[in-house]
Image: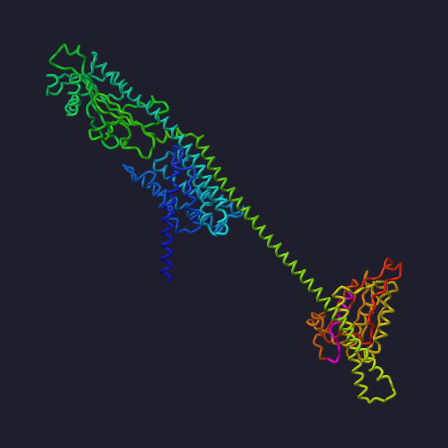
Amino acid sequence: MQTRADGRKLIVTLVRVALLTVAYAATGLPALRLTIPPGYAAAIFPPAGIMLAAGVIYGYRVLPGALFGSLLLRFLAFGLPAGPQAHLVELVTVVIALASMLQAAVGTRLVRGLCGTSPALDTPATIVRFVLLCPLAALVGSTISTTTLVQCGIATPVSGFFYWWNWWMGDTLGMLVAVPIVMALFGKPREHWAARRWTVALPLLAMILLGALVCAVIANWEQRRVEQTFGYDAKKLVNAFRNELRLDLLAVEAAAYGNTKLGSPPAWLGEAPSIHAVGRVSLQGGIGATALPVVEQTSRKPSQDRAILARPSVQEALKRALMVDDLAASEPWTTGKGASEQAEFLVWIPLPAVQRKTNMSARKLAYAILNINHLDPRPLGGEAADLAICWLERTAAGASRRIAGPPQCERPVRDLSLEYEEAAPLWGRNWLVRVVTTPGYLEALRSWGAWAFSALTVLGIGATGIFLLLLAARARAINTLVTYRTEQLEREKRAAREAELARVRAEEATRAKDRFLSRASHELRTPLNGILGFAQILLHTHTEALSEQQRKQLQRIESAGWHLQAMIDDLLDLSRIEAGTIRLAPEPIALEPVVEEVTSLLSEAAASQDVMLRVDTGATDATGSRVLADATRLRQVLTNLVSNAIKYNRHGGSVTIGTRREGDQIVITVSDTGQGMSASQLAELFQPFNRLGRESGPVQGTGLGLVVTRNLVELMNGRMEVASVEGQGTSIAVRLPAATAADEPTVPPVPSEDLSPLHEHASSR
């Protein structure tokens, strides 16, 4: 299974590499067609961005598509290299292809490392990093490629910088423009890029098409300007070349027609650079003579000229000169080898008829041996000084033979787009003059204005791409924020509805509970009062003597009745507190009477438990002992606390009630020497109906007393603090606001609600 999965992955990778190869060449070819002449690099090169995006999406394994795509692009654009420098051109092509793949790998590493393995480019920070990384990655391909061009002599060092800048700028803008488009079509995560097909990819494609149209128009204008300028300069150079050659030959004719001695090099020969040697000959027998012409005078050794005059091509030219009685040139021959190889030819100059009358049996002719390589008309060409001129001869088979000019100039020009050819039929030969451009000439023709305008157009496209990315990121952020806020509002609405529903249900439950408690209290109190009443009558009536067992049973009935009565009272109080219907009437209250009343009420219960009740009020004065509270509820609070301290105390223990003033508060403490509580029991102390594990003990209770007590204290703007040590006792402090002069009533206070009479058996703990 693993082998099959690996095979599928390999097939998918190969297909992707093939598709990327085609995409590289398909998008690179029109980009090269838009190159502003003269130049080797496009103003914007989308294949660089396509390969960077492919590397980011699919990984490094698809990057060979850049290598194969670059090779295919060079083949489609320039064809297979030919000539003696074909191997050098092939090497340059391979180096450029490798540089393209290396650039894609470096860009992939940078973008993945600094923008994320699957970059969404949805924040300004990641977009800025991407924009800065693109020109950094583009340095790889541009630097390696242009350095190779310069080192191989294809570009001059001066023009190399221009090519490097243009190459770097084209790859950078290609990345900035093509990466967002490719990512919008194939990028991951899809939820981030799918929506950008219309907001980023489509506008960028439209901008690229518009920019391509602008660049095409500029490139066409620039190409026409360069072609017109080159055509003018080339024609000017060719005319200068032909005129210079004619002038040299006119000098020979003038010397031949006159009586100038040619036995030694004449002075004017140094001013005719194309003339290698001159001389006069006589020919016995006229046109049909078979003997070699006799050298009468020559500017060099006669033996050198005799060897040349014996050439068949020279003899054939002599016959033509005699036949047409005009100048005739021989077929060129080569001298030297290798780089010093040059071509020479001879031109026959028949003498005028006046000179022939002196000896009708012999013909007089002058000749000149020409080497056009020594003729340099370029100083006469002005702006055309950097052009290369090539003098060719058309053979009978239609091929071209170089007579003068740079090596290999007879071959068709492929790498340079500009060439000029002009036929030059002279002296009976089919000459051809070809002018080709040189890097220096192209450098001089460069129009920086057109290039700058094109560069600004492409920069505008790149800036548009960056702006669209930022705009899309901003829109996504706003959309995310709106979605989040909408969901939050929906959650808040649901929570509000649920809270309202819960409130309504709670209110209904509270009302139902209140109704139930009120009815239950009413229904329970009626029979309970009867039970308590009859139990008290039986216990305190002496008409009939009760046995000890009967008396104890009646006391149990009475105790259980009072316990049930206390539980009903606590339930009603807790229900009113939770419903918020309990009414309080805070007023300044003197503590001493309240404390005395509570101790008097519970003294009998304390005595029955063998517990001593003590009161400590020495820490407060008359003013400080007045507290702002509801009188009835304050007595209820103290009764509950002291009752619990008595019930849960030990035999022979004590309960101390203390009062003191602390700032603007009155502190009432109830301390006992009873069982105390552990830390876990303290944590559960104020849970309703929780008696902290003492349900099975001898002390009766409901677990509601302290809950009601704390709620009452808090309703009177106070708080309750509990401190306990297991086995040693408990101390509860009630803090209530102290009364001030402003709290003294100016009108009679509103009495609090009627409460059930406090009974001697206070509720719960």
Question: Colour mode?
Answer: rainbow
Could one spot residue 92 in this view of the protein?
no
Give left or right: position of 730 versus 39: right
In this rendering, would 508 be left or right of 90? right
Give residue 8's position: percent from left, percent from top: 37, 57
- The residue drawn where x is 72% and y is 66% is 510
Quarter of the view holding residue 414 = top left
Residue 207 can be seen, yes or no: yes
Image height of 161 relative to 686, above or below = above
For the point 84% across and 84% down, the residue is 539
When the figure is inspected, residue 292 is found, relative to residue 632, above or below; the finding is: above
Give the quadrant of residue 23.
top left
Magenta region includes residue 28: no
| Percent x, y of residue 171 | 43, 41
Position of the N terminus by quadrant: bottom left
Query: For the point 80% across and 73% down, which residue is it?
Result: 642
Q: Which is more toward the observer, 609 or 153?
A: 609
Please determine whether, in this image, residue 564 is positioned above or below residue 485. Answer: below
- Looking at the rendered structure, the number of numbered marks drawn on it comes to 0
Magenta span contains residue 704: yes
Range shown magenta: 697-713
Q: Is 566 or 251 nearer to us in this picture?
A: 566
Percent position of residue 267, x then y: 25, 16
Image coordinates of residue 763 in percent, x first then y, are: 78, 74
